[in-house]
Image (tube, rainbow, N blue to C red):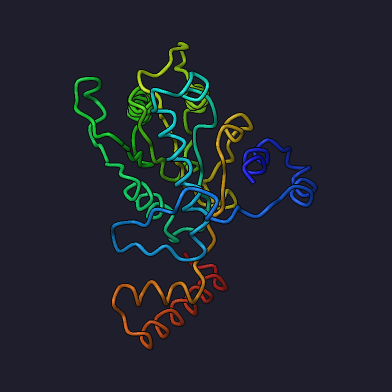
């Protein structure tokens, strides 16, 4: 399973179908891996989110290993440095990432200019919005890299990112070949499908340094379960979800925004 997750990012597009037919395997049962951490908030992990939540959970466990002083240099500084969650707009990509981070004890940091003087939480993470200026993005990435922090990059394919810098950092070194002050740097990107206007496919080099996984839309039953978890009566939840699905269908048929 893990070899497949890493290997699929290395396969040329013309061979993807053959690769999938030959090597795709189901995720291992959760009982054989780290127990899934449930968010402390009212975020509901539905069945379609369990495998991806587990994948994030395992990345955070791997980060813990990198931070462990008992680990050797290859364990502390090697390996893939991130994951991209791809899915339709409005299906909760960022919310899932935030819920998973907080369930694993991460705390958001907003000040990325004060390094190295500031006092950091044990597990820091930053958010990089699409609207941030390029110079600020570069400064945030370098700060997070040296702090061993996690960075959420919203809509990672909606504007040309600094691929050369990202490639260097995901290989474990700065552009001037320096190791981080603390290991543990991790990129979590979210993106809409590249078929949507204004989206750019990543370079082959960057794609091979990140695991890409697809977040499916919620099912009808899952949306009902979420509403009921928020306190909506079952009958009203069913009506709301049906009305929502009808409007989505109408919007798609009419090519509405």
Q: Quadrant of residue 80?
A: top right
Q: Is residue 159 above or below residue 44?
A: above
Residue 43 screen position, x and y as percent: 34, 62
Left of 169 or right of it: where is 235? Answer: left
Residue 251 screen position, x and y as percent: 50, 72
Q: Is residue 238 visible?
A: yes
Q: How many marks?
A: 0
Q: Is residue 232 above or below residue 75?
A: below
> Observer-nearest residue: 123 or 173?
123
Left of 123 or right of it: where is 67? Answer: right
Please report the residue visible at 39 percent of the width from the left and 53 percent of the height from the top: 37
Please report the residue visible at 46 percent of the width from the left and 42 percent of the height from the top: 189
Please report the residue visible at 30 percent of the width from the left and 64 percent of the height from the top: 42
Q: Is residue 183 above or below residue 252?
A: above
> Observer-nearest residue: 230 or 139?
230
Q: Is residue 118 above or below residue 47?
A: above
Q: Quadrant of residue 70?
A: top left
Residue 32 screen position, x and y as percent: 55, 51
Left of 70 or right of it: where is 7? Answer: right
Q: Is residue 164 visible?
A: no
Residue 142 screen position, x and y as percent: 37, 23
């Amino acid at each position: 399973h893990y070899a497949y997750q890493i290997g699929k990012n290395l396969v040329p597009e013309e061979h993807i179908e053959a690769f999938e037919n030959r090597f795709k395997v189901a995720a291992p049962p959760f009982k054989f891996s780290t127990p899934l951490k449930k968010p402390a908030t009212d975020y509901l992990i539905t069945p379609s989110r369990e495998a991806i939540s587990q994948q994030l959970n395992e990345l955070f466990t791997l980060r813990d290993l990198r931070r462990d002083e008992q680990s050797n240099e290859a364990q502390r500084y090697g390996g893939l440095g991130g994951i991209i969650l791809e899915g339709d707009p409005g299906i909760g990509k960022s919310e899932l990432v935030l819920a998973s981070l907080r369930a694993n004890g991460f705390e958001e940091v907003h000040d990325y200019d004060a390094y190295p003087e500031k006092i950091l939480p044990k597990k820091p993470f930053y958010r990089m919005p699409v609207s941030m200026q390029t110079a600020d993005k570069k400064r945030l990435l370098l700060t997070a890299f040296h702090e061993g922090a996690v960075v959420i990059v919203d809509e990672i394919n909606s504007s040309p990112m600094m691929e050369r810098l990202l490639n260097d950092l995901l290989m474990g070194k700065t552009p001037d070949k320096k190791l981080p002050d603390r290991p543990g740097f991790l990129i979590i990107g979210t993106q809409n499908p590249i078929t949507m206007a204004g989206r750019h496919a990543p370079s082959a080099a960057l794609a091979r340094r990140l695991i890409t996984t697809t977040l499916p839309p919620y099912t009808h039953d899952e949306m009902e379960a979420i509403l009921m978890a928020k306190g909506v009566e079952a009958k009203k939840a069913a009506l709301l979800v049906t009305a929502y699905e009808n409007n989505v269908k109408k919007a798609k048929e009419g090519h509405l925004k």
